[in-house]
Amino acid sequence: MTTTLPETGAAESQHEVVSGDLLRFATAGSVDDGKSTLIGRLLFDSKSIFADQLESVEQVSKDRGNDYADLSLLTDGLRAEREQGITIDVAYRYFATPKRKFIIADTPGHIQYTRNMVTGASTADVALILVDARKGVVEQSRRHTFLATLLGVPHIVVCVNKMDLVDYDEQVFEQIRAEFTEFASRLRVPDLTFIPVSALAGDNVVTRSENMPWFDGSPLLSHLERLHVASDRNLVDVRFPVQYVIRPQQNDTRDYRGYAGTVASGVMKPGDRVLALPAGLETTIESIDTADGPVEEAYPPMSVTVRLADEIDISRGDMICRPNNAPTVTQDVDAQICWMDESASLVQGKKYAIKHTTRWARAMVKNINYRVDVNTLHRDEDAQEIKLNEIARIRLRVTQPLFVDSYQANRQTGAFILVDEATNKTVAAGMIGGPAHQF
Amino acid sequence: MKSHVLSQLRSLEAESIHIMREVVAEMQRPCLLFSGGKDSIVMLHLAVKAFAPARVPFPIMHVDTGLNFQTVLDCRDRWVERTGVQLVVASVQEGIDRGLVQEEPNGSRNRIQTPVLLEAAEKHGFDALFGGGRRDEEKARAKERVFSFRDDFGQWDPKNQRPEIWNLYNGRVHQGESIRVFPLSNWTELDIWSYIEAEDIDLPDLYLAKEREVVERSGMLYEVNGFTPLKDGETAQVLSTRYRTVGDANLTACVESGAVTLRDVVEEVAAVRLTERGATRGDDKVSEAAMEDRKKEGYF
């Protein structure tokens, strides 16, 4: 029999939401630790699930003889996944409360899908790690946390789930918290929060649980609503990768020449002295244009068009920055990479296409420094090849200079992808820089 | 000091503009698929903003099923006139006449527009097609990439999609292959409407409520007109209705609504309890996996 889910005090209606900001979070967990149910619960309790979707879930749950509406059916999208009862790819979900709009990158937890976790975490402000209260911190919890920190996710929220199955016992929660904190101390985790929840019963997901009076923190949704993410962005180092040159071939705007792009970091203003790379020439920002007219300043992630006071030869892939605060110009790149291709491994001497900001070049693997075991954080310095879902530190030689920052300082200008030139597949995610992690 | 926080609508706008510029910078011959529905209109509006003050540097393509609401065609022509964008029309009727596709028994041209679309894209050499699909529309779409790789048959293989990390999109394709690009991937229906209201975007008037003569079939309301005439034994009624999606005129139902202004629509959408496809698209009711199947064939 299917019981209709109790509404555990829903978030308010959505329509004042337009003024709120955007928070992206990535979820990770094993097949069984209730991640899909947790997301289903967030969508359901924030009234982001529509009546027909819920009906469909209730019907399928009933057909399968389940006792309760299986909220994981809301998120397990592809037929292949429903048949196997697993999630095989990153799925994006959306919900909004009056305070914020949320984008969830829902990534599967199996060992073979590190690739997806990396994809989901790459743009995330927050990583949600699920731990089954009965099982405690397992290998996979460590792996997901490591990957989240590798991808520079600034906030980590550990949901200790299935608290209903351990009688809402504070000791169980505290023990997991202690164990997790000990493990996380070896990683660079700027902000770590623990919340005891039951996704199935709705405890501490949207509303405070009456079953765990000992917990004085916020329920998950309020925590996500209040999380301060604005200062996570780099507003100091001006980096404007030129994406496209706008030169209208029209009579009325014949002299217009604007550099279109997305502000990667920093705050730009008209009148600022800027340096164009690789030209190495200085000039002044004349105007920052948008289709709605010029703006007084531009900051990430605004898409704008910059006009400069002097005519400098600038094209796609070039970088505009400040004269006294420029990225490193280099053809030698040290980076951690996550290998994402199942059909071929990364080996020394192989050449790939590399995309860094808006610049494409070619890169050769000079050296594989070591491979990291994502479970133990152990380094294998004898690694000869890097296979699917493996993490390694490598050195690349690039055919032309890139304008880079360390990934730790700048998630935009510290990131790159490698593309196989024969298959055109994206084969690696790369994070530039010194040892960002203390493993 | 200013907060330097972009509102969610402006963040979405910035992301879409970034995506469109990336495609124009990297692909040989992009084209925007324009159905005349609100999503494709928002996409065109964003394209205008992305390249201003220059004109939109790619054509738009309308796959004309021959089953169009006249106000949709009028709106399309206003947009073409106003923006100076180049319009390519691919006709499904002509495809039927030439034997490229066959009319389906249920009168839906939704499925048979795919071969017409693919043929036109090939003829014009389009290697990137912008589509207005959103991930919130349907479960199979939730896993769609922003840059969605299609093989040389235009087909989508959910297991063979490129990882998309950060905003570093990879549009590299071999001859004959192409990508579909979904700049509105991260928008929800409510975002779309909030944005239409904020930017005062010109839409077909179908989206706003007015008194319409309608007939109820399987729980859906169809306007009584040349495409959906009254059948024997049916009775029409006059209700205040509006359209939530615009598809084939013979299959798209309207919903009861009192939303006569864009503000009303935003409030209605914020409160509504059915997904837009579930509410008004007869062609999506076929099976739960209907969308997944059509996407594999090359549907948008």
Image: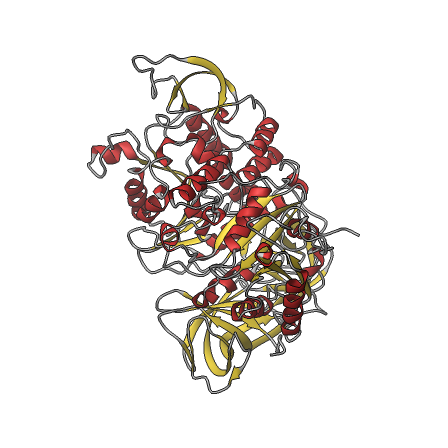
Residue B238 percent coordinates (x, y):
46, 13
Q: Residue B84: in sight, yes or no?
A: no
Its colouring scheme is secondary structure
Residue closest to the far left: B99
Q: Nearer the viewer, residue A108 or B164?
A: A108
Above or below, A297 against A155 in this view is above
Judge left or right: residue B155 versus residue A271: left
Indicate the quadrant where residue B265 lies: top right
Residue closest to the far front: A167
Above or below, B29 against B225 in this view is below
Residue at left offset 52%, top offset 24%: B208
| Quadrant location of the C terminus of chain A in the rendered image | bottom right
Q: Nearer the viewer, residue A40 or B55?
A: A40
Residue B45 percent coordinates (x, y):
53, 39
Residue at left offset 72%, top offset 70%: A324
Residue closest to the far right: B1
Residue B84 percent coordinates (x, y):
48, 37
Residue at left offset 61%, top offset 43%: A96
Q: Residue B197: in sight, yes or no?
A: yes
| Quadrant location of the N terminus of chain A in the rendered image | top left
Residue B132 percent coordinates (x, y):
46, 42
Judge left or right: residue A115 versus residue A344: right
Above or below, B259 against A84 in this view is above
Disc count in the image? 0
Q: Nearer the viewer, residue B233 or B163?
A: B233
Q: Nearer the viewer, residue B287 or B64?
A: B287
